[in-house]
Amino acid sequence: ADRVVKLALENPRMVGNPMEPRACAGRYDAATQKYALYACTQGTAGMRGQLVYTMGVPDDKIDVIAEDVGGGFGVRFNMYAEYSAVLLAAKKTGRPVKWTGSRSEVFLSDEQGRDVASTSELALDASGKFLALRFSYIADLGAYLAPTGPFINTQGVVACLTGVYAVPAACARVKLAVTNKAPGAAYRGAGRPVMSYMLERLVDEAAVELGVDPAELRRKNLVTKDKFPYKAANGIIYDCGDFEGVLADALKASDWAGFPARRAEAAARGKLRGRGMAAYIEASGGGFAPSDQVELRFDPDGGVTLYAVSHSHGQGHETSYAQIVASVLGMPMEKFRLRNGDPAVRLVGNATGGSRSLLGVGSVMQLAAKEVVQKGLALAARDLEAAAADIEFADGSYRIRGTDRAVSLAALAKKYAGTASALDVKTEGKFGVTFPNGCHVAEVEIEPETGIAEIVRFTAVDDAGNIVNHQIVEGQMQGGITQGAGQVFGEHAVYDPDTGQLLSGSFMDYPMPRAGLVEGLAIREHPVPTATNPLGAKGVGEAGVSGSLPALMNAVLDAMRQAGVAHFDIPATPDRIWRAIRDAKAGGRS
């Protein structure tokens, strides 16, 4: 290579901190020898499987019940020791047993995320074309392994090893370490933000060393639209995308060309203004279950109950699933209700995680609704005394073509509810991985005398495929971007290196992002439908983190370079920013 750019980074340890601390209750029925666990979980089927394995009991002897859950972020994907403990205690005492964790226990024992130290290298030719990527990193998995910890910190990180770029060769060397800390596993993004942070920080570093526009360097190396399906250097195949179009939209929406004037205006006010970009891609939609099953049951009162294993804890499944089924059946959305992981309806399926629920379970919901329509056709033919071939379905009703004779699906469902001819269906499906992607552009201002950094503009252009509910997608992006900003500007689980004592074990020591942290947020859609699932949808729940984390840190460092700071890493707290600027002024490069 004509040039090799090298960058060492640290991605600090994060605490998920759902609003509701972890809690569980267990009971045991001696007559049936059956356990029941009530817990905060992202999926009851997977939780039941882990309990069956650890307790050594048959699958039909454990029920897991989860009602409303106050947040997940990956830390409620796996079971914890307390869950089996309350069940064993309930059997021993003959009474229900409940355990409720405190916020301090959340910090000490809930699974944590990130905590990766890396060295990244990018090889380029004389024209700035990418030739190869090499990553070497070590991930801290804590004192013992969480069930998903090794997978997330290996495959979860390196799945999209070359990002959105056409790079002929790439490799990653991964080491996993056990230490005195809490177990390391999933935290929103589950490995993908680690890769986007390493890669997008590295590309910006290359742009600085080459003295070129970081947007132009990215544009020159993107996988172009005519190359799809594209096989990346690590063998993974991107089925579709428009990386050039996404980048162009982001440049326009963020007024990339107008930044120099905004920087000059900030300088006149004594502020350091910086700009950062990140073009990300992530693999979403995979799952550990063999398929996703759903069931639709029609109630005598005309309502429809949707059963699924995925668990809604802020994703809006109650709305999006109902919207999907209602659009096929032509019934009002208020007629539908969702039951997550009902123990009376044993289904196979994946927990909510990996940005997969809509494209997985949502797609099966659509298939189930279409099956209902086909099933109803025979009933309509019977009621209308006509051949099925002469009947058409539209707007929730079956009608004999060319006549006004019709019967509504709702009427048929109500008439035949509870009979052998009921419209109830049980359907399953499994679909391929999707590759949501996007380009985020951030602008920050730093007060050099105090080190305080402020987000003044943030533009996100994302390809999530076909979108069912735009408001839910926007909410997911806002949440992901805010969590990325939280990590950049303060969140960091700190352990004493000598004693192993957790030093940031409360909200007094661990600064959570607040509502006003992300200002000037502009979210744009650039949908490119995928053919890997019936909805044409891609994952969106974690994309905001993968884009915002490197974009914001690139912006912070871009601002600090004006004060002579050459390298800086997370977290960008005021004291660290102030100290880096002071050191640069006192002795040269920091």
Image (cartoon, rainbow, N blue to C red):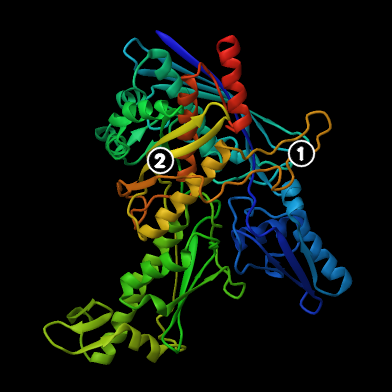
Q: Considering the numbered disc 1 on the image, is that residue within a helix, a strand or a loop?
A: loop
Q: Quadrant of the C terminus?
A: top right
Q: Residue 458: which numbered mark, if any?
A: 2
What whole-number distance in Å separates the C-alpha atoms at marks 2 and 1? 32 Å
Vertical arrangement, residue 386 with respect to residue 375, above or below? below
- Pointer 2 with pointer 1, Cβ within 8 A: no
Q: Residue furthest front?
A: 269
Horizontal and vertical percent for residue 504? 73, 41
Residue that numbered label 1 is attached to: 503
Horizontal and vertical percent for residue 416? 40, 89
Q: Residue 556: which numbered mark, if any?
A: none
Q: Quadrant of residue 144?
A: top right
Residue shown at 43% from the left, 23% from the top:
204
Residue shown at 47% from the left, 64% from the top:
317
Q: Badge 2, how many Cα within 10 Å: few under 14, some, many 20+?
A: many
Mark 2 and mark 1 lie on one chain; the one further toward the N terminus is 2
